[in-house]
Image: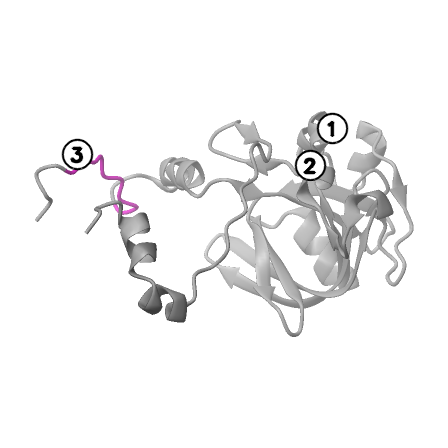
């Protein structure tokens, strides 16, 4: 039973809406989504560059990241053909270029050339990375998992290279990386305000009643 003081809700069911309509709803609530700016190389040697906003870390040890190809995109076909790819951070100053690389160019066209994005050789693999991106993850194909109309591409991370200017105290700093993220529809966002808050240990929670009181806000 819904409490009387709870806001009313609108319901969206995948069994009622068609797939494209439900996809738009899903994209509007799973937000913000980081962008994998994926560079791949075709069997013929053409470099493809495309943004994928279904992207996250899959495993820590071994380090594995994943992005999803909705349909059989060039990124997926090329990764399967060559067994490697780079994931580049999509930086705020390149929002126009990141968006333009989503254009459905033919497979034998290079999005980087069309949009003026400069590529450079990677350190450990044959696929290029984005020279204008502050972060590049060099990956080999770990696995590809088909799920309905989409394929989740898992990449084993061989190396992460970061601009020296974006590293402080031994780790990359988000204010220097300035990553873009996707929202619903055609909406994009940037990091905005950054908050730092430490996790609370159970020991502290159990030994200091004021911790729970402060979080509940009930003063009890």
Q: Which residues are magenta?
A: 6-15
Most foreground residue, 114 or 197: 197
Q: Which residue is mark 3?
A: 8
Residue at 11% across / 45% down in the picture? Answer: 2
Q: Quick one: which residue is furthest to the bottom in this view?
A: 61
Judge by depth and name the residue closer to the eye, 28 or 216.
Answer: 216
Q: Which residue is mark 1?
A: 93
Q: Is residue 165 left or right of residue 18?
A: right
Q: Nearer the viewer, mark 2 or mark 1?
A: 2
The residue tagged 2 is 178
Q: Is residue 191 above or below residue 124?
A: above
In screen coordinates, is 210 left or right of 183?
left
At 79% from the left and 41% from the top, the residue drawn is 133
Asked if residue 164 lies left or right of residue 19, the reply is right
Q: Where is residue 26 shown, x and y percent of the image?
A: 40, 42
Proximity of marks 2 and 1: CB atoms separated by less than 8 Å: yes
Residue at the spot 43% in from the left edge and 61% down from the top edge: 200
């Amino acid at each position: 039973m819904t409490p009387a003081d709870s806001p009313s809700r609108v319901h969206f069911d995948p069994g009622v809406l068609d797939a494209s309509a439900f996809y738009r709803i899903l994209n509007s609530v799973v937000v913000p989504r980081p962008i994998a700016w994926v560079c791949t190389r075709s069997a013929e040697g053409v470099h493809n560059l495309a943004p994928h906003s279904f992207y996250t870390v899959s495993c820590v040890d071994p380090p594995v990241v994943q992005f999803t190809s909705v349909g059989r995109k060039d990124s997926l076909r090329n990764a399967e053909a060559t067994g490697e790819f780079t994931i580049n951070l999509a930086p705020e100053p390149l929002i126009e270029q990141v968006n333009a690389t989503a254009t459905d160019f033919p497979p034998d066209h290079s999005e980087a050339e069309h949009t003026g994005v400069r590529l450079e050789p990677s350190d450990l693999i044959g696929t290029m990375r984005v020279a204008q991106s502050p972060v590049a993850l060099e990956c080999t194909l770990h696995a590809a998992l088909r799920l309905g109309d989409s394929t989740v591409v898992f990449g084993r991370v061989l190396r992460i290279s970061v601009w020296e200017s974006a590293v402080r105290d031994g780790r990359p700093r988000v204010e220097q990386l300035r990553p873009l993220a996707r929202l619903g529809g055609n909406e994009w966002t940037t990091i905005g305000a950054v908050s730092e808050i430490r996790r609370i240990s159970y020991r502290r929670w159990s030994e200091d009643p004021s911790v729970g009181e402060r979080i509940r806000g009930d003063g009890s």
